[in-house]
Image (spheres, helix red, strand yellow):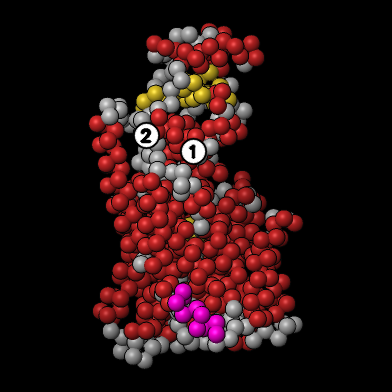
Amino acid sequence: MSIINTKNLKGDIFGGITAGVVALPLALAFGIQAFGGINDPAANSIGALAGLVGATMLGFFAAIFGGTHSQISGPTGPMTVITAGLTAGAWASMTNPSFSQVLLTMSLAGVFCGLFQILFGVIKIGKYVRYIPYPVLSGFMSGIGIIIILQQIYPLIGLKSPVLVVEMITEFPARVADGISLVALLIGLGTIAIISLFPLITKKIPATLVALVVMTVVSLFVNYPEKLTIGEIPAGFPMPFFAKEGMSLAGIDWLAMIKMAIIPGLTLAGLGSIDTLLTSVVADNITKTHHNSNRELVGQGIGNMISGLFCGISGAGATMRTVVNVKSGGRTQLSGVVHSLFLLAVLLGLGSLVKYVPLSVLAGILISVGWGIIDFKGLKDLLKIPRADAFVLVVVLLLTVFVDLLTAVGIGMIIACVLFMKRAGDLVEGSYKAGEISNFDKESPWADEGGVPEEIKHKIYIQRLNGPIFFGSITRFQEVMHDIPTDVRLVIIRMKLVSFMDQSGLYAMETAIKDLQAQGITVYMTIIQPQPMYMLKSMKLIPNVVAEENTFKTFEDCTDRLRDIAPTL
């Protein structure tokens, strides 16, 4: 399908430009964070340029070749954390470190990332993302948010951040004792305040951009230390690493470079694929469309490969930028192209202006991003959800923060699968019926459904669910609930055969019911088994979402209610 859709040309152009405005400060901030572990003044300007190039190249090619029409791609928190570890490790491993070799290592990792993602798409691995349980994703994203915040506390007070989280925590007292920049702290706090409060005034102008401009201008009048700014970045059209000015490739040990880059490349590919496809689902829910997950992975792979070739940092589908694009009217791939062209236009003439941007402003922006990444909903419910889910969430969070991201996801998946198999075995032993969620023909009533009043049958939809609602079945569950006709007045969800519900299933149920209620449809629930009832009540879905009087122990009780309300339905 062509990316040019003249029917939505205005919406795509406006959405793309708006997304580009939001992406600009994030690209600068993520780029600098990616080189934050290198103790050299030039790291800031090189990182800022790498962030802009990554946002431009990935955003452009992923939009053209990807499978999500309204997706905006660019540097993201999880990807930047991996890249930061890679660049710092490359710098530390060299006897005579140079940015040429660091950029080359990062470029190769980006190329490998792209190649792996293309492979993932070709072998159709995208569909398996649905099997990642909510506690794993929650712990992973919260861990990423915590890492970003810990890293940015240092530049917020005018200091250089260590690379390892343990060092960030243990070295903090000693580094603070050496002195902090009060001006940097105030500028950074002002940035966070604007990002937090400006949306209360208007959401039409991105708060991050307002904070970037306002606090940069303020810094010019308060004697902000020049060494704590980005510094000038080279302007001009990006060039590939093998043709880049000042890039020395002489005497490179290519085998060593490949060995250093291939595992981070695989890690980037895995995390980027998960991040992207989750954002694709968000875009689908807003636009009521359906993305092609495998094509999206191929598009992301092409984008990251080209971004790597041009010394840009790797990225993924960005949720906030995608939502901004959609809300601003973007509906086709053209919006992603416009977003990238906007960033390219800025890149071509930005060098003389960006040097004044304080690092504490970018730290404030990233702290706000990190705060937004943390899954406070999942953490708040830790004491209410099943202990197995809570255990997985906490383990993944701790491994993400203190070990590494890929290990966290891998171990989290293993634990989740083992715990689920145990729970599934317990269900069999308890004589619970199990099976896939399925949508029965509502025109063939069960024996106890014969009492539904004839005059209101056409206004009622009976949705029978059969089997556990858990992380492996919520995709089918969402499809079933999405197929409910919108012209009915009341939906009866039969829970008799739902023997188990985990956190992923609970949140999917909550979303489905709220969507029905938003359409003016009343929801009844019947014969809720003990474990699902415990989950629904402990998480307050009953009575906050479904009133207590709208749940029934038997279908006959529900039928009695239907007779009472028949005249008003």
Indicate which label's residue lies in the foreground, 2 or 1.
1
Task: Tell me the element at label 2.
Answer: loop
Q: Is residue 170 magenta?
A: yes
Q: Is residue 422 visible?
A: yes
Q: Which residue is mark 2?
A: 500
- Picture residue at 40% right of the left edge, 77% below the top: 87
Relative to 61, is 192 on the left or the right? right
Of marks 2 and 1, which one's residue comes earlier in the chain? 2
Q: Which residue is mark 1?
A: 538
Q: Are marks 2 and 1 in contact (CB under 8 Å)?
A: no
The answer to which of 509 and 500 lies nearer the viewer is 500
- Picture residue at 65% right of the left edge, 71% below the top: 189
Q: Is residue 28 visible?
A: no
The answer to which of 277 and 171 lies nearer the viewer is 171
- Picture residue at 64% right of the left edge, 52% below the top: 328
The answer to which of 262 and 438 lies nearer the viewer is 438
**Where is 449 relative to 214, above or below?**
above
Q: Classify residue 337 by image quadrant.
A: bottom right
Residue 211, percent from left and from top: 68, 68
Q: Which mark is residue 70?
A: none
Residue 274, percent from left and from top: 40, 55
The answer to which of 193 and 429 lies nearer the viewer is 429
The prevailing secondary structure element of the residues shown in magenta is: helix
**Three-letter amino acid code at the position of disc 2:** Phe
**Three-letter amino acid code at the position of disc 1:** Ser
Q: Classify residue 563 by image quadrant.
A: top right
Relative to 78, is 216 on the left or the right? right
Total tally of numbered discs in the picture: 2
Q: Which residues are magenta?
A: 168-177
